[in-house]
Image: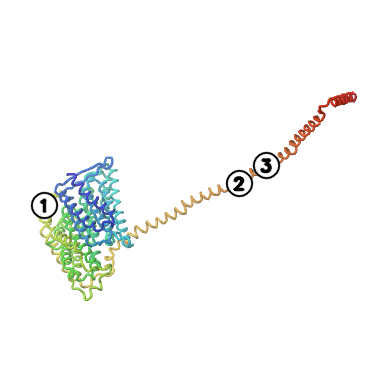
Amino acid sequence: MSAVIWLLISLPLGAGAVLGVTGTRCNRLVPALGVAVAVATLGVAVAASVTRPQSSAPLFAGMRAGLAVDGLSAFMVVTVAAVTTAVLAFAAGEFGPDENRGRLFGLMLVFSGAMLVTVTATTLPLLLMAWEVMGATSWALIGYWWRRPERVRAADTAFLTTRTADLGLYLAAGAAVAGGAGSLDLRALPDAPSPWLHVITGGVVVAALGKSAQLPFSFWLSRAMQGPSPVSALLHSATMVAAGAYLLLRLHPLLAATGWAGPLVAWTGAVTALFLGVVAVAQRDLKQLLAASTSSQLGFMVLAAGSGGIAAGTTQLVAHAATKSGLFLAAGAWLTALGTKHLPALRGAARTYRLLGTAFTVGALTLAGLPPLSLWAAKDEVLASAYAESTGLYAVGLAAAAVAAVYSIKALWYVTQPLPDDPEAGYDTERDGTRRTARTTPAPLLVLTFAAAVLGVLALPGPASWLKRLVGAPDEPSPKPWEVGLSAGVAFAAAGLAWWWASRPAPVPRPAVRWARGWLHLERAAHTVVVRPVLRLARALAVFDDRVVDGAVRQVARGGLATARIAGRVDDGIDAAVRQTARGGLAGARLAGRVDDGGIDAGVDAVAAGARGLGRAARRPQTGLLHQYYAQAALGFAVLVLIVLLVR
């Protein structure tokens, strides 16, 4: 059985890596190969959800990489694989052969593989690895059109914001090791001793809230809309943003162990659901509206995790994944066909493209929480858990549900209005529209729309009881009849008011509208509170480094250079003295040479010359004549006698 779970994660990761490096070389084959891999992964995910495999392998000393499919992750692996298949099938017709299909499809498969590892990981190190891969590939996908600077900046903002929050997981891992949880098994984290338990919980909460675009991190989701529509449908429905909510649902025992984390998470989710719903109402861009609604809908999942509604949060997650991915795909199809996503320019789009219009209508009504569609039933489950926790939480959640109906009906109102007299005037504001939809659009869109409509069966009494037992929360509260009726009445009333007010100016002060349309100016606040102080500190440190550290180094260098120059001058003096000594020695040598040549050698030469002269003189008497020898002897004796006489 362990082979199934390894195949589940290795299939998209391996195939995605291979497709990613092919680039444009196999552009015609890449869509078919990508969809085939996604379909195969979906089949393996279904098998894994039935067989519930688990496995582990050594990772580090004393730590293992654990994978398991249990009741909660069984829903997630099927949801992630199904949404990935639908999105890739849609993208096959949206990206032409002139685009780098290999990079797009490869990155989306790697991303979905990392999400599958995230939802099946049972140990913190493996979860961290998958978390990092998701962050890196999301950055690459959002900035897919990297030649456009604004899209790269958007990808950087999304990556840096989530990356900052992700540091919480590293803090949690470090605290778990310090607290003695050497194996870093997720099930062992609630048993960590205090104060490490609180540090672990705080790190997990920050990382999860950042990844799920909850307050105060929500603004990154607005910038992420710069990515291609299939990327938005994949990242912001069942995968990346859902990862944080899933982690909180998975680690609810950890939240409960601290006492403070559960209420904090629940209230953060409720406030995000309300305030980001208001942000969605203020938007005039369809993708921005859907992005803000994603943060708002994820707030319900976070609310469920904080209040102990594990089954309710799971139902909300699955229903929202199908609904939001379908809406994003419809928005992307209109953007391709009409070249705009501006809501006033999309008037009558549902009438022009009836299949898209039908799918979008069902999705919008589902997002509005109208009965009997899936998110109405899912929200009732979440609100039941909130009511069991706190009446205040229930009131805020119910208000957020009413706001959800408003922003959903607002989007629906625009696209279903009659065409204006000159619809072409508002088209092609962002790209040149094709005025048609791709052949691959209908199938995935209809499947997702159908799932969005019917997944509410998970909230019916029988399936709901089964789901609660499956995720290990059999005592989770169910909504009472009055709660069901109240939420339905609120949704219908809010939807009716939204439709009636859609053509009228909102009775809201313009500064409030600008504040909401600017996503509560959270990005500006982040720049003011975090980015600018950090940059100022960096500049101050750079100046300190230049003037103090580098200055000291330069002064030492100058001192060394001056010393070297002095040493050079001393050395030059020594060299001069040596040269003078050498010159004196040379002069002495020359003088000695002259004395030798003119004196000694001359004397020797003179002696030699004298000896030679004496020799010549001595040779002259040697004539060989006897009478001359006698005469010479006589002369010699005479000289001798004379000397003797003179001496005496």
- The residue at which mark 1 appears reads as 465
- The residue at which mark 2 appears reads as 572
Q: In the picture shown, does residue 290 fall above or below 559?
A: below
Q: Quadrant of residue 327?
A: bottom left
- The residue at which mark 3 appears reads as 586
Label 2: state its secondary structure: helix
Return the x and y of residue 578 as percentages of the image width and height: 63, 43
Label 1: state its secondary structure: helix
* The N terminus: image quadrant: top left
Give the CA separation, mark 3 to mark 2: 20 Å
The amino acid sitting under disc 3 is Leu
Q: Which one is in front, 161 or 44?
A: 44
Instruction: Tell me, for residue 498, which label it has, or none.
Output: none
Give the CA separation, mark 3 to mark 1: 115 Å
First of labels 3, 1 by sequence position: 1
The amino acid sitting under disc 1 is Ser
First of labels 3, 2 by sequence position: 2
Total numbered badges shown on the rendered structure: 3
- Is disc 3 surrounded by few (<14), some (14 to 19) or many (20+) residues within 10 Å? few
Question: Is residue 453 shown to the viewer in this render?
Answer: yes
Q: Residue at 16% of width from left, 47% of height from top? A: 52
Q: Are marks 3 and 2 in contact (CB under 8 Å)?
A: no
The amino acid sitting under disc 2 is Asp
